[in-house]
Amino acid sequence: MLILAIETSCDETAVALVQDGRTILGHAISSQIKEHKLFGGVVPELASRLHAETVNLLIDRVCTESAVALHQIDAIAVTYGPGLEGALLVGLAAAKALAQLLNKPLIPINHMHGHIYANFLSGPLPLFPCICMVVSGGHTQLLQINDHFSFKLLGQTRDDAAGEAFDKVARVLGLGYPGGPAIETAALSGNPSSFKFPQAIKHEAFDFSFSGIKTAVIYQLNSLKEAGHSIPVCDLAASFQHAVISILIFKAIKACEYTGISNLMLSGGVVANNALRTAFESAARAKKIRLKYPEIRYCTDNAAMIGAAAYFYYRQGPVLETALATPNLSI
Ligand code: KG4
Ligand code: ZN
């Protein structure tokens, strides 16, 4: 089954052609980072306008480059939430028009399901039941997945998402937007043991809290400034990153041990972080846990993951009749 997938939930316009949920025939991403960078973060109105200017061009490009004619497409998949309402609407309008024109099914997909199903795009198939940790710019959640689209929420952040904390700390350290990759690069030249940041609510079930770590970095920064010291940006970045990764690993392993499930899956933009990937690898090895995470390019927002989720979702049975942009859609 050949699915054309469209993703416009935030600041990347993305289109992909995915065969049977696993094989990517073509994909393209147009990032808006350059335009939003001027404002230090995503500007929703600007995002919608840029998606509208780009989405049809990307559909054309992906089809042409992969030599796929529109009539060969079996279904259109599109993200309908969560995300920015105006941005979601652009993708939905393009997808609905194409589905009507081709008289093919429209498969509305939850963006977070897309992140999870990025794990189906390469390597061995994930096994169920598994524990899945979703760490993105808007979410930090621990899930138990018993079968396709059977999610049980074990815990989530009580305040900032992990990616949001990366972005905010990068801003206060003057590293700019987007913060995750900037912190990762700065951390390469820093010492992760320079500063000890709190690993909040370590002992409480499976919930997370990241605003405390962020505030601790700000206090540390201010006290260094007041004392007239030069700011060890790389050491602060490395210590912050280390604190976040440690708490993520602690909770994920705890969830595996608590449930007796030894398959662990990671997903979301923060999983593009190499230090995180390496640290999870050694923790999983020590605990004999089977670990799976997507290729770096499919961790951050993309349309291939939406095509993968759509295939497995469609295989399950009836899909939603109508799809409205749903900014606060939950898992
Ligand atoms: O999954 P994603 O692309 O979008 C959402 O659905 O939110 O995640 C974006 C988040 C941002 O907060 C970004 O700073 C973070 O993922 N991120 C990273 C890295 N690359 C992206 N965080 C840490 N290290 C990275 N290399
Ligand atoms: Zn995302």
Image (cartoon, rainbow, N blue to C red):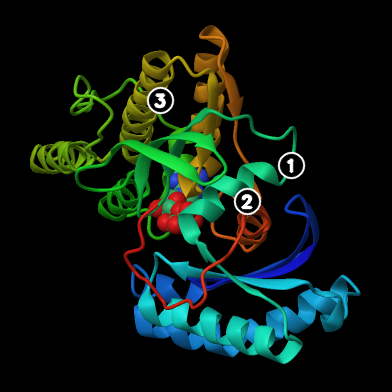
The residue sitting at 12% across, 40% down in the picture is: 219
The residue sitting at 82% across, 82% down in the picture is: 70
Q: Is residue 58 left or right of residue 111?
A: right
Q: Is residue 136 left or right of residue 70?
A: left
- Mark 1 = which residue? 122
Q: Are marks 3 and 2 in contact (CB under 8 Å)?
A: no
The mark nearer the N terminus, 2 or 1, is: 1
Q: Ligand 1 near label 1 (Cβ, under 8 Å)? A: no
Tell me which corner region of the image, top left, top right, bottom left or bottom right, holds residue 122.
top right
Q: Secondary structure at mark 2?
A: helix
Q: Is residue 27 left or right of residue 247?
A: right
How far from the left and from the top, in percent, is residue 9?
47, 70
Whether residue 112 is visible, yes or no, is yes
Please tell me whether residue 179 is drawn above or below residue 319 in the rendered image. above
On residue 252, the disc is 3
On residue 298, the disc is 2
Q: Are marks 2 and 1 in contact (CB under 8 Å)?
A: yes
Amino acid marked by disc 2: Tyr
Q: Ligand 1 near label 2 (Cβ, under 8 Å)? A: no
Please tell me whether residue 33 is drawn above or below residue 95 in the rendered image. above
The mark nearer the N terminus, 3 or 2, is: 3
| Label 2 – label 1 distance at C-alpha | 10 Å
Q: Secondary structure at mark 1?
A: loop
